[in-house]
Image (spheres, rainbow, N blue to C red):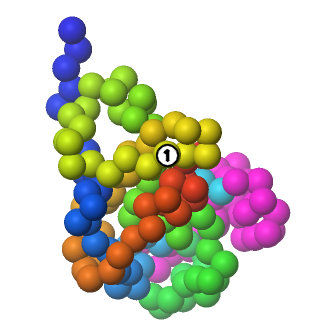
Amino acid sequence: MYTSKLDIDFVKHSTRFKCTRCARCCSLDVLLDEDEIRKLGESVDLKWRTTKKLFNGSSLVCCFLKAKTCTIYDKRPKLCRAYPFTAISENEVRKLHAHIPSSAVRVLGKDGTSFLIMYDDECPGIGKDGAVDWQEIVDLTADR
């Protein structure tokens, strides 16, 4: 039987997050949905379905980043809003044979599917004092 060594960080009810506006997430490729592609227009790289990238020093960053400020912060794409979190169905995690701790938060999607929420442990906002609406994370990321 296949056994996995996947080390996935799942949120717990005690997980806290507050965005530090470090712009780390602005160097990631964010897959845009059709509505976001339409709204962002010429700023979209249609081949990759992401925002266009520009060089900031030696790094490629989102074309909406100026210094360390997102110029569309209040209207940014769903995956940007959810970062550093993303939801994955519990069934998919089980197929990967990843260990699911009993403390992992489970959130039901609109169709009753159970989702777990993973996070990027390198995000400096993890552990900062701020509550997160886990249902909102599922709503933003589960249908991707």
* Residue at 27% in and 48% down: 104
Instruction: Find residue 94 and report its horizontal and vertical position in percent.
Output: 33, 27
Relative to 52, say whether 10 is above or below: above
Percent of width and height locating residue 123: 30, 69
Residue plotted at (75% across, 70% down)? 40
Q: Is residue 133 visible?
A: yes
Which residue does the image show at 62% across and 67% down from the upper left? 77
Tell me, yes or no, whether the highlighted magenta stretch contains residue 75.
no
Tell which residue pokes out farthest to the top in this image. Answer: 1
Residue 129 lies in what quarter of the image?
bottom left
x then y, percent, for residue 85 = 40, 60
Describe residue 77's horizontal placement relative to residue 12 as left or right: right
- The magenta-colored residue range is 33-61
Q: Is 57 included in the stretch rendered in magenta?
A: yes
SS for dot 1: strand
Q: Quadrant of residue 35?
A: bottom right
Q: Residue at x 45, y 88 (%)?
A: 68
Amino acid tagged 1: Leu
Residue under pointer 1:
108
Q: Position of residue 133 (x, y in %)?
A: 45, 68
